[in-house]
Amino acid sequence: MPYVERVTKAGNTIEIERYFTSRYKKKGISRGDKVKPTKEEQEKVNTRQAERKLRILINANYGYGDYHLVLDYIRRKGEPDRTPEQMRQDIDVFLRECRKEYRKAGLEFKYIHVMEIGKKGARHHHLVVNKIDTEILQRCWYKAYEGHKTTC
């Protein structure tokens, strides 16, 4: 049975995907009927493609010594959880501060960001950033999250 091969080069990695098809380059085979996938099937396809794109992006731009950060929020009793808008503001301040620090160090700031609210309500940010001193990253997060709070 013939197969189709897709080769993707990203950074130091080469990804080879092979999938079999009975229809490829066969004479006399007409197009099949249009079949609409179910919502679950389409969601699965979309998730798989998103994971593939993210994997290629990370492999192409990051390597040894770069960081995967998880920026958490402290949950205190009596305080409401951060809203997605507040989380967006926090990460915008963090990224702005990081750009300043990377520029001072003479480095290019590259990042990939995903905001997540877990099943139990835990709020955090996942980032992949290029290498810099971890104290600088901690200071930037402090300015973004802890630094702008007002105490009553």
Image (tube, helix red, strand yellow):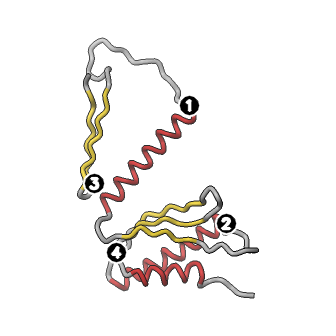
Q: Is 40 drawn above or below residue 98 in the view shown? A: above
Give the residue number, with chain letter if any, for mark 4.
131
> How far apart are the two marked residues, 3 and 2, measured between alpha carbons?
36 Å
Give the residue number, with chain letter if any, for mark 3.
10
Disc 4, SS: loop
- At x 49% / y 81%, what residue is drawn? 140
Q: Amino acid at mark 2?
A: Thr
Give the residue number, with chain letter if any, for mark 1.
38
**Which picture quadrant has residue 16?**
top left
Give the residue number, with chain letter if any, for mark 2.
83
Image coords of residue 135 (percent x, y): 43, 84
- Along the horizontal axis of the image, is 37 left or right of 86? left
- The quarter of the rendered structure image containing the N terminus is top left
Q: Earlier in the sequence, mark 1 or mark 4?
A: 1
Disc 2, SS: loop
- At x 31% / y 32%, what residue is drawn? 19
Query: Is 121 or 28 nearer to us in this picture?
Result: 121
Q: Is 81 drawn above or below residue 1 in the view shown? A: below
Disc 3, SS: strand
